[in-house]
Image (cartoon, rainbow, N blue to C red):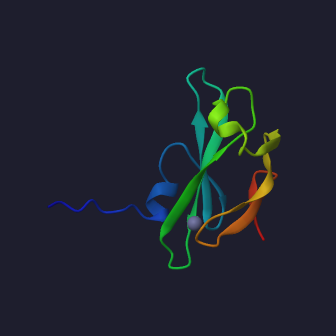
Amino acid sequence: MTTIPLKTWEEMSQEPGSIIIGPTSFIVKSINKNDEWVGITEWHKDREGTLCGGWVPFDVPGIDEFYRKNAWQVVSLDPLHIEPSLLCSCGNHGFIRNGKWEPC
Ligand SMILES: [Zn+2]
């Protein structure tokens, strides 16, 4: 059996496409087939320092209807500002405003 090592926050945050928005947070853009920005994957460290994250769909015309009812409102794409706050099952909680992670 082969074990695939999980990447660390430090490794993942340095990959192409990763946008660091705070000391323990970075995002990766989700683009649809029409090259429209429709969401992000938001990555952070959990309480043990392990990489943790989740997908955050945007309430924009290009998003699949399936995701739209639970999508985040986009106040601004540049700098990124979405509402409401993001709360992860690991307890990580904060806002993305002015392109930065603001912990709650
Ligand atoms: Zn988490």
Residue drawn at 62 percent across, 45 percent down: 40
Give the left or right position of residue 39, taking residue 83 as reference. Answer: left
Give the left or right position of residue 5, taking residue 56 as reference. Answer: left
Q: Position of residue 80 (x, y in %)?
A: 77, 45
Residue 90, picture quadrant: bottom right
Residue drawn at 52 percent across, 64 percent down: 52
Check the image and name the residue furthest to the right: 75
Residue drawn at 65 percent across, 26 percent down: 36
Give the left or right position of residue 4, taking residue 20 as reference. Answer: left
Indicate whether 74 appears above or below 96: above
Query: Considering the image in quadrants, where does the C terminus appear?
Result: bottom right
Q: Position of residue 89 (x, y in %)?
A: 60, 67
Indicate whether 14 appears above or below 6: above
Query: Considering the image in quadrants, where does the N terminus appear?
Result: bottom left
Mark yes or no: residue 79 visible. no
Residue drawn at 60 percent across, 41 percent down: 29
Mark yes or no: residue 78 visible. yes
Locate ligand 1 by image quadrant.
Answer: bottom right
> Total marks drawn?
0
Check the image and name the residue furthest to the left: 1
Q: Position of residue 41 (x, y in %)?
A: 58, 49
Please state which of residues 90 and 68 is positioned toward the viewer in this rendering. 68
Check the image and name the residue furthest to the bottom: 48
Indicate whether 99 appears above or below 1: above
Q: Position of residue 15 (x, y in %)?
A: 47, 49
